[in-house]
Amino acid sequence: MSEFSIEDLIVSSLLDIPAGTYGIASSEWHNNTRSDILYSPKLDIQKSLPPVLIEVQAIVDKKFILRLMQYTLNIINRYDSKPMVLVFCVGKVSPKSLLAHFTQGTCHQEHLWTFPSPVWARKCLFIFKNSYNDAAVRSPFEALEAISSFFCEKKATLFEHSHSEDSTIKLLYNIAKDVTAEEIQYGNNFQHTLDIILRNNEKCLNQIKKSLTVTADIKKTERLIEKGITYNTSIKIMLSDISTDPENDLEFPEELPVGIKRKTTTPKLEEEIAFIKKFKTNVGRMNWRQCLTKAHESNLFSRYSTRSSLRTNFSKHIKKTKN
């Protein structure tokens, strides 16, 4: 749900605001907990708008409600503003008596249920697993109904979904396809790089073994061991994005893209590159996890969720900007 179009679908369904007003923010907290998705206004002049917390939960019970309240307290401490909360319940409410605390929406919002939250949230809304069933008589789905349906049905393909002709459902499957393609590409590239590293380590070890069994040349063995150590050190430096040009006959893995091929030069990309350069200048030794957290707080790099993907993509872009 960190894709830009889904972000707008959700926020515009909750708040009457233009597309592009909100961006993804860090959902990691100082007490070592993490909520699912957090959106916040992009501009300082929009700070009167509430943060928006999104949770996808299998079982809604009292423990989850208490955890949800803790998330909102963290948000209040950070933004000095009570958030808007939306929970997609893809399983059940336990015990069923807990449903007595919820109030169903009216008119065109029957799928939204409100949980009382006057102290810790501006509004706390739930969409339950079967809330979208009554929407079958309407076409198309309301955006939040479509997202709930997508989560709950868990169909592998658009063809299998019960509302495959709905435009929002089609959009969700297109996004899922792109994300899956990037994950597959990342996995393949990771395996390819690992194979090269392991193959070269095996080559070094076999050379060392040969030097010991044939002539027992200690000096040559020491040189081979040193070559292997240097190679591994160089790989570590390479993966840390520090330039290196070792004189070595061992094969170095090429820099492969993390995801599917995209446009290489955009104003947004230039802004992101400038952000990382400035961050690295300020902190000295690069900390990619901290960089990603700070970037999310500045509404940058919303398409990245891990430090490794950010690091790999940034190295690729920096290399291209130098050419």
Image (cartoon, rainbow, N blue to C red):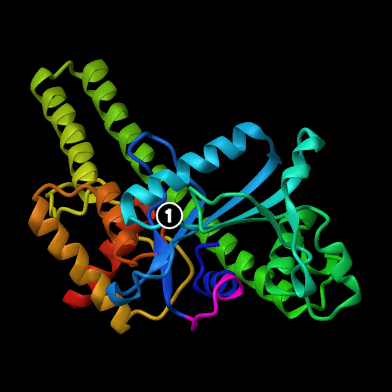
- Tell me which residue sits at (83%, 55%) in the image: 130
Q: Which residue is mark 1?
A: 305
- Vertical relation: 106 (above or below) 211: below
- Tell me which residue sits at (34%, 58%) in the image: 310
Residue 8, percent from left and from top: 53, 75
Residue 179, percent from left and from top: 56, 63
The stretch of residues the image draws in magenta is 12-19
Mark 1: which amino acid?
A: Ser
Q: Judge from the rendering whether residue 298 lies leftward or rightward of residue 167; answer left or right.
A: left
Q: Residue furthest front?
A: 118
- Tell me which residue sits at (31%, 55%) in the image: 292
- Vertical relation: 207 (above or below) 123: above
- Tell me which residue sits at (13%, 19%) in the image: 217
Q: Which quadrant does the N terminus fall into?
A: bottom right
Asked where in the image residue 216 lies, by quadrant, the reply is: top left
Asked where in the image residue 137 lies, by quadrant, the reply is: bottom right
Q: Does the magenta segment cover residue 16?
A: yes
Instruction: State whether residue 193 appears in this view.
Output: no
Q: Secondary structure at mark 1?
A: loop
**Residue sitting nearer the eye, 165 or 68:** 68
Q: Does the magenta segment cover residue 205?
A: no
Q: Judge from the rendering whether residue 3 lies leftward or rightward of residue 157; answer left or right.
A: left
* Callout count: 1
Q: Main SS of the magenta segment?
A: loop
Q: Residue furthest right?
A: 137
